[in-house]
């Protein structure tokens, strides 16, 4: 029988709390909740120790835009933006519960470890207010009661990630909860440089830049030491994240590319990320993971090996406004990529990119990438359909280091269907074994979407060769959007140096035909 200690009994006994470590260097945590006493099964409900969800999300009904009369629910924090402004009592900021939560977790660790369970509200309107990172400990698993109930909300001005690992630790376990990153409520005043519409951003501390994580806010961040940006790397972490739903992070839903690998995400969703959806480190396992509406790329792997199983990236780059600049007044679309693989090898098993701004898949200097890639109706930045570009917004270059802002109007030059194929092999991408399904989807919302006219682009002069590729390219809309297998910019010399099977027919002469048998007649034997 589990010995659950009631909070009333503990409070009556006058138990004192153990203080957790500081959330940031130089910060002293407040007193924790009621002291934790070890129980038989080591399962600790936060509510039994005085920790309840105290942050709320007030709802108001507002139209999305003049072109979309649909009434949707938003918080009152930033009108028209689907963010969270976590508040407490009316017109007050929510209480920061970071210190008491971290103290609760540390007490469990001190008692030998266990599972910390956090409750919540079934419509995500009530959650745990966070203004400092919740520190994941090796000894303590953090569980919610489901992503439809338990929510951790980042308070306005927190300017930090929601969950971070204790420096140089591994074996973290977080599951069954929702993270709301409140991206419009984070400021980072020193992270972006901007003086007016049309001015280039010269800072490299953009939310999409994974090399400057300390000027960022992610749902889950794993780094060597979150209090020391220059700390050196360490070995594999073997961390596990299951049933995690991350909405509106300022940066990525999860960033793990600064630590060792063997990190597993299963049944996870990133929605409306301001940077990339998932920025994965080497030897990451992503299974049943979806990225929707990230401003930049859906999945970014910069080195090492990631395993994608039943994953999907869609509508990346198709955001309603430019939230970092000018209070979101600059509308735009971006040539974001579903999956961007750089300097690594990885495995794909049923991976799909759909309705992204640029390519579905971008392999750059990648070797030994294997698997099944499905690229459907991408190159949305070149699409002129009203549903994908209702106000005629101009595109913004997909470059976080020099990111020009546009005030509507046409771009120069205008994106074309050949600019972003379904799959692009860039630089020294060699020895890859790919099965590609490229398709411009059938009617969506009554119209055809996506200008994915070409299935494949190969940078032969950059070193993309010795690849084994099978491509199926079709048009499900009206028979006019599918132009060809290879982009016009792909040099003819790429064909004999890659084995390409296109719609069942070979494009390459890499496999030599056997020589014909000799037709020369043998001399007849003499007869006497």
Image: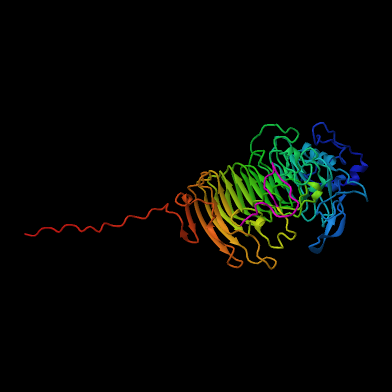
**Residue nearest the viewer, comparing 96 with 499:** 499
Q: Where does residue 523 sit, x and y in percent of width and height? A: 16, 57
In the visual, does 77 lie left or right of 427?
right
Instruction: Identify which residue is drawn at 75% across, 39% down.
Output: 215
**Residue nearest the viewer, comparing 390 with 267:** 390
Q: Where does residue 93 sit, x and y in percent of width and height? A: 90, 46
Instruction: Identify which residue is drawn at 68% across, 38% down.
Output: 211
Residue farthest along the left direction in this orientation: 528
**Residue nearest the viewer, comparing 212 with 244:** 212
In the visual, does 69 lie left or right of 291?
right
Residues shaded magenta: 395-416
Count of numbered circles in the view: 0
Q: Where does residue 411 sit, x and y in percent of width and height? A: 69, 53
Q: Is residue 396 magenta?
A: yes
Q: Is residue 152 visible?
A: no
Looking at the picture, does residue 229 appear above or below residue 408? above
Q: Is residue 375 visible?
A: yes
Main secondary structure of the magenta stretch: loop
Query: Which quarter of the rendering shows the C terminus?
Result: bottom left
Q: How is the image coloured?
A: rainbow
Q: Is residue 404 magenta?
A: yes
**Residue nearest the viewer, comparing 158 with 377:** 377
Q: Where does residue 308 sit, x and y in percent of width and height? A: 61, 51
């Amino acid at each position: 029988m589990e010995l659950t200690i009631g909070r009333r009994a503990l409070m009556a006994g006058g138990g004192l709390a153990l203080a957790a470590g500081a959330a940031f260097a130089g910060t002293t945590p407040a007193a924790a909740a009621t002291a934790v006493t070890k129980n038989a099964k080591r399962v600790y409900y936060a509510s039994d120790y005085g920790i309840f969800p105290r942050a709320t999300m007030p709802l108001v009904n507002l139209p999305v835009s003049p072109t979309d009369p649909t009434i949707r629910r938003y918080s009152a924090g930033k009108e028209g933006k689907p963010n969270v402004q976590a508040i407490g009592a009316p017109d007050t900021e929510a209480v920061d519960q970071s210190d008491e939560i971290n103290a609760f977790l540390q007490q469990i660790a001190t008692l030998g470890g266990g599972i910390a369970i956090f409750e919540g509200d079934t419509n995500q309107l009530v959650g745990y207010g966070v203004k400092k990172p919740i520190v994941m400990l090796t000894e303590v698993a953090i569980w919610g009661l489901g992503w439809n109930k338990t929510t951790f909300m980042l308070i306005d001005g927190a300017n930090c990630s929601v969950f971070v690992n204790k420096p140089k630790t591994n074996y973290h376990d977080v599951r069954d909860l929702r993270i709301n990153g409140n991206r419009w409520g984070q400021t980072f005043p020193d992270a972006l440089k901007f003086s007016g519409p049309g001015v280039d951003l010269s800072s490299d501390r953009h939310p999409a830049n994974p090399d400057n994580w300390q000027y960022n806010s992610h749902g889950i961040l794993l780094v060597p030491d979150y209090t020391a940006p220059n700390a050196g790397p360490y070995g594999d972490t073997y961390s596990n994240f299951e049933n995690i739903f991350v909405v509106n992070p300022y940066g990525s839903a999860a960033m793990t590319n600064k630590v060792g690998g063997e990190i597993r995400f299963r049944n996870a969703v990133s929605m409306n990320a301001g940077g990339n959806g998932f920025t994965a480190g080497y030897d990451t396992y992503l299974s049943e993971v979806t990225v929707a509406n990230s401003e930049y790329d859906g999945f970014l792997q910069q080195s090492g090996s990631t395993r994608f199983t039943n994953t999907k990236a869609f509508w990346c780059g198709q955001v309603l406004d430019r939230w970092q600049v000018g209070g979101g007044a600059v509308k735009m679309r971006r040539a974001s990529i579903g999956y961007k693989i750089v300097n690594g090898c990885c495995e794909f098993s049923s991976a799909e990119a759909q309705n992204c701004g640029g390519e579905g898949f971008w392999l750059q200097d990648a070797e030994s990438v294997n698997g099944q890639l499905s690229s459907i109706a991408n190159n949305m930045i070149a699409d002129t359909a009203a549903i994908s570009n209702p106000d005629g917004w101009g595109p913004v270059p997909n470059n976080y280091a020099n990111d020009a802002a546009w005030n509507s109007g046409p771009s120069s030059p205008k994106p074309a269907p050949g600019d972003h194929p379904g799959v692009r092999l860039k630089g020294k991408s060699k020895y890859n074994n790919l099965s590609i399904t490229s398709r411009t989807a059938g009617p969506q919302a009554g119209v055809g979407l996506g200008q994915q006219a070409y299935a494949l682009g190969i940078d032969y002069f950059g070193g993309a060769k010795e690849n084994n590729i099978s491509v199926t390219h079709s048009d499900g809309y009206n028979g006019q959007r599918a132009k060809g297998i290879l982009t016009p910019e792909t040099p003819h010399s790429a064909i004999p140096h890659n084995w390409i099977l296109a719609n069942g027919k070979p494009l390459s002469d890499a496999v030599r035909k056997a020589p014909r048998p000799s037709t020369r007649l043998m001399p007849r034997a003499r007869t006497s």
